[in-house]
Image: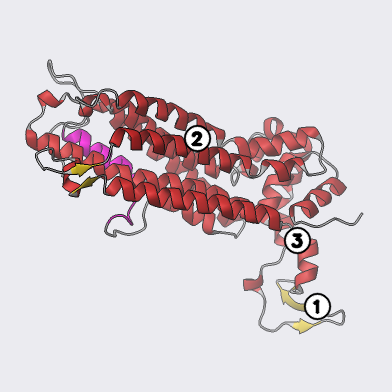
Amino acid sequence: MAGTRGMGFPTGDVENNGWQLYITSLVMIITAGIFVVARFITRYWYHKFGWDDAAILLSLVNSRPLPPPATMCSLLVSICMQLAIENGYGMHKADLSKTELRTALRFFFIAQTPYKVAVCANKLSVCLLYLRIFVTKSFRLACYVVIGIIVSWSIGGVGATIWQCVPIAGSWDKTIDAVCIDKSKFWVAYAVMNILTDVLVLALPIPPVLALKLNRRDKVLICGTFLLGGFVTVTSILRTTSVSDSVKNQSDITFNFIERGMWTLIEINIGIMTACLPVLKEPLVRIFPGALGGSRTASRHAASRENYARTYSLPQLSSRGQFSGDGRDTASKKGRTVVTDASYLEETRWSDEQHIIISSSTEGSAADLRSAKGELQGRTTRS
């Protein structure tokens, strides 16, 4: 329901800070959308999409209209924020009619749930990417435990958000005699837990990377790729500070919560962008070879597309495969032999994620890269 306040610019003597939140929502969703498109182009280039891509897409935008809470994403948060601003969010409560106040607060309430789903989807996307890179049993167990914590916390957060008042309409219509939780404590507790789960996700890949037999510079580069998600933690901390400040003055909620809303949008969209960065490592190295990978890495990327073409792809196997004398099924595909024996393939193939992360970040010899590959796959590489 569009209002009459436009993008929230001040008019006459009436204060209105809504424009700050409106412009922030436009800039952040467009920028995050560019990162997601670049991520999917990279995945298409390597012929490999996964559940982590689906999670990041869910975080950005829903694929079809479904009843809440299924249509929850960063785009929906931005739309709800903009509709709230058009109905007076960003102005003092005293300058709003009762209808405008209820409508603005209703859109503010609706935005809270997709925000929590977007935060959850961002973290899950990163964890699912980890599972495509590190395949040792110990790491996968730790990763699944973290995923369980994130999902459980998010389900609890969404439930508490939707039913923060009973009846639900009491969250935005203060004329209803509703029973509500202590929203201030809930908002702060959720923000703190958000930071803690960020730290868990950031810490997951560091031990296996430090255990790789690579030089210190290469380890720092690889760890740096994963720790780019630390930007999200910084924004989460800043948002928590803003939430803590806003709950001290809820008497003028439509005017005092603008800064908090801006940090909310920045946090979820920075989360989308940083979740895309590990996948975009190779294109970034191609663009900035000296800064991100050095000359050896740049030359290595010149042949990366050709090298990937030598890896196997089971869906592309010809139905007229032949059985070779050494016990491996083979099939001819455009002049080359595709080998389908699992043990042989496992020994000779880089996964695309391992190739992007390790090959893009290291300057080591071929033996060093083989050793790193073997350790990622949980086995000792023969010299």
**Quick check: marks 1 and 3 in contact, CB under 8 Å?**
no
Residue under pointer 1: 328
The residue that appears at 28% across and 32% down in the rendered structure is 22
Amino acid carrying label 2: it is Val
Nearer the observer: mark 1 or 2; the answer is 2
Nearer the observer: mark 2 or 3; the answer is 2
As measured in the structure, the alpha-carbon distance from the residue carrying label 1 to the one carrying label 3 is: 15 Å
Residue under pointer 2: 232
The residue that appears at 44% across and 40% down in the rendered structure is 32
Q: Is residue 70 left or right of residue 102?
A: right
As measured in the structure, the alpha-carbon distance from the residue carrying label 1 to the one carrying label 2 is: 47 Å
Considering every residue shown, the one lying at the far right of the view is 383
Q: Is residue 267 left or right of residue 340?
A: left
Q: Which quarter of the image is occupied by the N terminus?
A: top left
Residue under pointer 3: 349
What secondary structure is the stretch in magenta mostly built from? helix
164 and 286: which is toward the camera: 164
- How did the renderer colour the structure? secondary structure
Amino acid carrying label 1: it is Arg
**In terms of sequence position, does the residue under pointer 1 or pointer 2 come before the other?**
2
Q: Secondary structure at mark 2?
A: helix
Report the magenta residues as a range.
Answer: 68-87
Give me the disc on residue 220. Answer: none
Task: Give yes or no for residue 141 being in the magenta stretch.
Answer: no
Q: Position of residue 256 (x, y in %)?
A: 26, 24
The mark total stands at: 3
**In terms of sequence position, does the residue under pointer 1 or pointer 3 come before the other?**
1
The residue that appears at 81% across and 48% down in the rendered structure is 369
Q: Secondary structure at mark 3?
A: loop
Q: Position of residue 110 (x, y in %)?
A: 26, 45
**Quick check: marks 1 and 2 in contact, CB under 8 Å?**
no
